[in-house]
Structures are given as C-alpha cells and as structure tokens.
Image: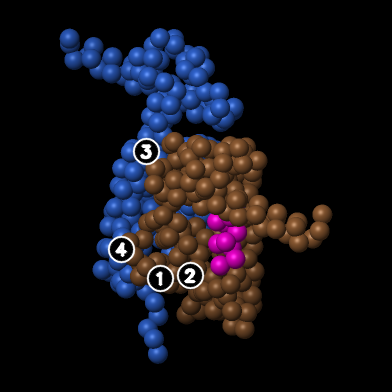
Chain colours: A blue, B brown
Amino acid sequence: MPKLWTETIDAHRAAVRDAALNAMAALVAERGLVALTMSQIAERAGVGRATLYKYFPDAQAVLTAWHERQITDHLDRLTAAADPAEPAVVRLRAALRAFAEIQHHSARHHGGELAALLHRGEHVDRARHRLREFVENLITEAARDGDVRDDVAAGELAGYCLHALTAAGTADSPDAVHRLVTVTLAGLSAPPPRP
Amino acid sequence: MPKLWTETIDAHRAAVRDAALNAMAALVAERGLVALTMSQIAERAGVGRATLYKYFPDAQAVLTAWHERQITDHLDRLTAAADPAEPAVVRLRAALRAFAEIQHHSARHHGGELAALLHRGEHVDRARHRLREFVENLITEAARDGDVRDDVAAGELAGYCLHALTAAGTADSPDAVHRLVTVTLAGLSAPPPRP
C-alpha cells in the first residue's frame, strides 16, 4: 500500500474516532449518562452503527476513550502553560493555574456524574501519575531555587496542590479560581524564619 | 404501651440496625462491594433475613445508612476536637487535623471503591454542607482575630481546606498527614505585608 494511501486511511480513522468522541460528549452533556447507546453515538457522529462498532465495542469504551483524550489534552495544556525560559516557581504557578482552570471548566461542563464514573480505571491512574510527577518536578526545582518550602517532600507538596485545586470545581467564578491558586501557592511558601 | 417497654423496643431496634451496619462494613472490607447480599448481611449481623428486611429494603439501603452513620460520627468527632475555650485558630487547627486523620483512616479502611459509590446522594450533600459551614465559621472567627487571611472569603477558604486535606487519603503515614495539615494551614496565613 503506498504511503499516501495509508496516511489517508489513518486520517480517516482518526476523524471517525474523533467524531464518535465528540458525539458522545455532546450526548452526555444533553441527556446525562443514563441512556447512552451506540446507535445514538453513531447517529450524532454521522457514521453508521456498524462502522462505530469497528472502533469501539460498546458505549463504555467510547466514554473511556473520550476521557483519555481529555486527560491527554489537559496534560498537554499544563505542559504548554509553563514557559521553559522562566524560573521554576513561575512555571509552577502557570501550570497550577492551568490545572485549576481545567478543573473549574470540567466541573461546569461535564458535571459530577461523569467525573464520578470516570475518575477510576487504569488510564486515569497513569494520567494522574504523569500529572503528579510533572508538578513534583517543578516543585523540586523551585525548592532548590529557594522559592518553595523544603521542609516537606516535593511529592507530598504535589499531592497537596492537586487536591487543593480540585476545589476549583466548586468555585463560583474565574476570580475565585485565581484566589484559590494564590491561597494554594501560599501553602508552598517557605515558612518564615522563627524569631 | 408502658414507657419502659417502648424504650426496650427502641433499644432493640437500634441494636439490630447497628449490627446490620457493622456486618455490612465487615463484609465490604473482606470481599468488596461486588457480592453484597441481604442474606450475607443478615447472617453476619446474627439476625434473620426476614428481620433485616423489616429494617432495610435492600443492600444498597444498608450501605447508605452505614455511610450516614459514618458521616455523623465524623462530624461529631470534628466538633469535639475543638475545645471551646481555645482561640478560633487553635480550634480550626484541631478540627482540620481531625478531618485529615479521618480522611487518612477512611481511605485505608474502606478504599476508593466504596467512596466513589457513596460520595454522592442527598445525605452526603447535607453532611458536606454542615462540615463546610462548621469550618467556615471557625475561619470567619479566626480571620476576625487576625490569625487567618481576610483577603479571601471564609467560604472559599473552607473549600480550599477541605479539598486540600482529602490528600490525606493518599498520605503514606500519620506524619505525612500532619505535614499536610501544616502546609494547608500555611495557605490560610495572612499574606506578609508588601514592602
């Protein structure tokens, strides 16, 4: 098979896959998870039901694939938020702000039902691990610069940050999200020297 | 019906109910949620199956009742942790430490599966609201004393604390839990005056 042809097929496959995931997300947003069927997803995606079954065995698989795509996108955004030329603490602040904004946005758009169902499973564990490692590395670097407390291990501080920032899911406004980031970062500050 | 007799019946009912809830918790800890049946719960609780059905319509109802009992116990512990003679910031610290310890303990003993299933529903919303209000009031008082930052609303700070402290669920040790409480409280400190 000539290379061009393969590329076209690959692009087509990716397009069908994306259409299915978008359709799934739209349907869940409109109707909730209760009645999510393969027929509905296929119809909304504009592909035949038989075609959809070539890509996904069932609606749950579409949901999981969609969630994986979301997580990957989010991790990419977090990494992109940090300008490598800046000091670690500035990159950390940018990444944590991006994370908080994603939490805020996701909670408003996909709701608790979806989250409760999805925030489990192997793909989530992997993503969570990557995320935690990314934040942990920034904290380690910032602590070395003296910009973050070094009396608590970077891994523990990363866990603290990521949990604290999930409060953005219930924040009332973008301003409240920014205040949350400020407060969370204050927890990371080096403790003042005791008199 | 004489009063004593009623009291005996009430006590008996409470005992059966408690036995059922304890049995449920023991079974879940041993086997997970998958195969939780009314027969198993009845057997473990030492009551007949028919009796159990007089108290609970199904295993899910036992689970929900158990969770309600847990939450009430936890809220009582949090309230008790705060000595009313102490300043607000000391009571806040005690309550947050108790909350973090409960998170740590619960995650180790009941696991994520149970939590994901239970942390929804009306009874949880009510309890969460009470908890948040309790912490918010302590923060308001401590801010008035000048011990907690007043540039962010007490309600937002309460949300921050409670989310940050859920990280105790993944903490490695009681020491790590205490460090988490210290870091979280540092986020609440009044920001240093700008030069």
Residue in front for this viewpoint, A102 or B77: B77
Residue B91 is situated, as x and y percent measured from the top left of the image, at 57, 76
Does the magenta run of residues contain B178? no
Q: Which mark is residue B97?
A: 2
Amino acid type at circle 1 is His
Choose top left, top right, bottom left or bottom right for residue A1.
top left
Residue B121 shows in this picture: yes
Residue lying farthest to the bottom in this orientation: A195
Residue at label 4? A154
Q: For the C terminus of chain A, which image quadrant? A: bottom left
Taking the spot 33% from the left edge, 55% from the top edge, the residue there is A135
Residue at label 1? B178
Q: CA distance from mark 1 to mark 4?
A: 15 Å
Choose top left, top right, bottom left or bottom right for residue A159.
bottom left
Give a yes or no on whether discs 1 and 4 share a subunit: no
Q: Earlier in the sequence, mark 4 or mark 3?
A: 3
The answer to whether B78 appears left or right of B5 in the picture is: left
SS under mark 2: helix
Position of residue B98 relative to residue B125, above or below, is below
Amino acid type at circle 2 is Arg
For disc 3, the neighbor class at 10 Å (few under 14, some 14 to 19, many from 20) is few
Q: CA distance from mark 2 to mark 1?
A: 7 Å
